[in-house]
Amino acid sequence: MDERTLKERTKRTAQMLFHTLKSGTGFELWKKFDKDLARELSMFFTGVLYSREVLSQKQRELCAVAALTALHRPNEVRAHLHAALNVGATRQEVAEVIFQMVTYGGMPVVVDALEVYARVLAERGEPFPAEEPK
Amino acid sequence: MDERTLKERTKRTAQMLFHTLKSGTGFELWKKFDKDLARELSMFFTGVLYSREVLSQKQRELCAVAALTALHRPNEVRAHLHAALNVGATRQEVAEVIFQMVTYGGMPVVVDALEVYARVLAERGEPFPAEEPK
Amino acid sequence: MDERTLKERTKRTAQMLFHTLKSGTGFELWKKFDKDLARELSMFFTGVLYSREVLSQKQRELCAVAALTALHRPNEVRAHLHAALNVGATRQEVAEVIFQMVTYGGMPVVVDALEVYARVLAERGEPFPAEEPK
Amino acid sequence: MDERTLKERTKRTAQMLFHTLKSGTGFELWKKFDKDLARELSMFFTGVLYSREVLSQKQRELCAVAALTALHRPNEVRAHLHAALNVGATRQEVAEVIFQMVTYGGMPVVVDALEVYARVLAERGEPFPAEEPK
Amino acid sequence: MDERTLKERTKRTAQMLFHTLKSGTGFELWKKFDKDLARELSMFFTGVLYSREVLSQKQRELCAVAALTALHRPNEVRAHLHAALNVGATRQEVAEVIFQMVTYGGMPVVVDALEVYARVLAERGEPFPAEEPK
Amino acid sequence: MDERTLKERTKRTAQMLFHTLKSGTGFELWKKFDKDLARELSMFFTGVLYSREVLSQKQRELCAVAALTALHRPNEVRAHLHAALNVGATRQEVAEVIFQMVTYGGMPVVVDALEVYARVLAERGEPFPAEEPK
């Protein structure tokens, strides 16, 4: 793939996943430390990896939520909670993935991810899953 | 749910996910240490949690593979690689979930999960994804 | 065990361990996302597991502090620091368990748990262990 | 404490905890890489930290089993499973601590520690807890 | 080494590494919980281990930044980001070590360490690496 | 950078770091699962990231050993122990980095990395550091 196509793909995928994030992205932060590497990282992770089509975007983002919950990465799970909802996962499905992680990572990582999820729903003006008709 | 229904549900879900596993299950091991607790653990994780229907079984198992890869749990990922394939995930989809974990958990966890996956495919007599027509 | 007995046991154990916690419990948070699962989780972890009597409650809570310190889960260790003190561990014993974790988890997890412990002691109006006569 | 006293204390504590371990200890391994540092590490961890008396040895070793299970350190948990049994923990108590870790570290770490524990019991010629009268 | 020499070495190494840290050190915190153990910990980690000369201090501190980034210990990485710069690592070298950790620990740990690093540079009144002439 | 240059750089860096590894590399494994992604991963991690010159190769590899030891990744640390020695780190320096990790990751990760290091030295026909004149 030529570099121009890759850059466009990177931009389009980033926009699709993360357009509801208000605060600065990883990319903005990376650039302050190394511009070349920021571009390479962005093209690799967003342009190459996240743009692949073996998985649906919904499937991919639910797996991201699963891993980031289990690994206890509260800052980064916030971005992928937005992304999962942005590509069509329901609020119940996202909650279910977080709860499932009790099996692999224990209860504390579930609690911490649910607290982030509560803030994400507030940011988006959306209700808690248990308040919705199923 | 009454206890008899829960036990049947536990058995049915365990069978659906793990019938291709030859070696002993977690449940067999737990029983050697505490019979009551083995039964409670099995009913909670398999009968209650894994039997829920908010997510499809395929979706749930791909999230299990994601988390167990990222957490570096090679013994347990083996069981869920079987389960993911048993409930309809393709070989390419499973590989893609493992590769995606480089983003959240780094490359070493990807390499170690792929090595387990290679053994799982051999156990099942199935080819590597890159050897198949897409 | 019938469900009514299990619910009573869940409530009694939760009260014994966590009555000094002012802010919301995990259970309150879980219910916002899924009421059925919140109840199941609470009955399993608090009613079944934490209510068992193979270990003394003091023994169990010191092991909880050990694991949560080593795993670097500062939010959850706070609840179990309260619980350990609530079921009879001394302030010195709790500090000693945290310090011991340097062996298995390194110094940073000890420092972060001690900072949480300092806040817990302040919440309870209790002095630091080094300020007490031994 | 003068160095001679510290060395004696190191030796006595190591003997008490680990005399049933057949294979080489950490200390033997460290010495191949750096003799001075091996001695310092041994005196600090065994002579200073493990010899303290704020906790009983049984309490301390159950906390070690808790942390090493939760952190997924199967090689090192083996040594402390021996130590816990050597200083008076019962087989049921040790199993209970491992099971409890499902709460903080998830099920895979419990399974892997129970497999190590099964081997430790075999090494010692002792039965599984569920085979004993309670 | 006699205790007086060890104490002086501990103080000198601590001063060299951490003199730019404004807020309280680990040592101040440890003392509130156990004065004897605080002294032992400080002498072992700072006086014995960090004072060794097999590695240059710059090399040692870059390895500390590597490990603390990869392990996701944002509080402690702050101290060693100061230390690395205090013993002669350049701002670019420190950033490079953090970025390299994407390979072993994934992107979220890199992002979280870069955010800490941004605050450390602000505390020190130093510019971001990408704003400097190379 | 054009793709041909990047491929050459990837190959040259891989050769410099890993030419003493007898068994298959990550790249060989990745290709069985996805040829395109294997190439992208290899070019990104080896061609882009590891080929940068902000750090010396020796510095970079000691940081790799630090992180992989602390994260408890025994399979992958083996490759970077070879690489560190291949780019000029001494046996003592490599051992020192592993020992230093006791501070951030605890003793069990040090023990497990030293056991891998002992096997790496045997593979290379090199003596243990403590057997050499300093």
Image: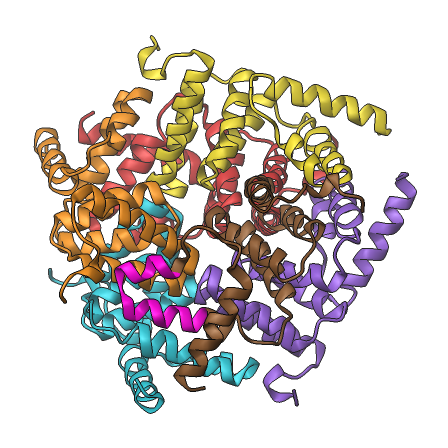
Chain colours: A brown, B purple, C yellow, D red, E orange, F cyan
Q: Position of residue E126 (x, y in %)?
A: 16, 49
In the rendered view, tell whether residue D1 sits above or below residue F83.
above
In the rendered view, tell whether residue A62 sits above or below residue F122.
above
Is A44 magenta? The answer is yes
Is B2 magenta? The answer is no
In the rendered view, tell whether residue D95 sits above or below residue B16.
above
Apparent side of residue A123 relative to residue B28 in the rendered image (left or right): left
Q: Quadrant of residue C36?
A: top right
The answer to whether residue D75 is seen in the rendering is yes
Image quadrant holding the N terminus of chain B, namely top right
In the rendered view, tell whether residue A51 sits above or below residue A130.
below
Say which of A133 and E17 sits in front: A133
Q: Quadrant of residue C47?
A: top right
Q: Position of residue D82 (x, y in %)?
A: 51, 41
Say which of D116 and A13 sits in front: A13
Q: Position of residue E13 (x, y in %)?
A: 12, 40
Q: Position of residue E63 (x, y in %)?
A: 25, 55
Apparent side of residue B21 relative to residue C81 in the rendered image (left or right): right
Q: Residue at x 74, y 56 (%)?
A: B55
Q: Main secondary structure of the magenta part?
A: helix
> Could you tell me how many numbered marks the image carries?
0
Image quadrant holding the C terminus of chain B, namely bottom right
From which residue to which does the magenta span run? Answer: A27-45
Q: Residue at x 37, y 74 (%)?
A: F45
Apparent side of residue F126 relative to residue B79 in the rendered image (left or right): left
Q: Residue at x 42, y 25 (%)?
A: C117
The answer to whether residue D6 is seen in the rendering is no
Say which of A17 and C98 sits in front: A17
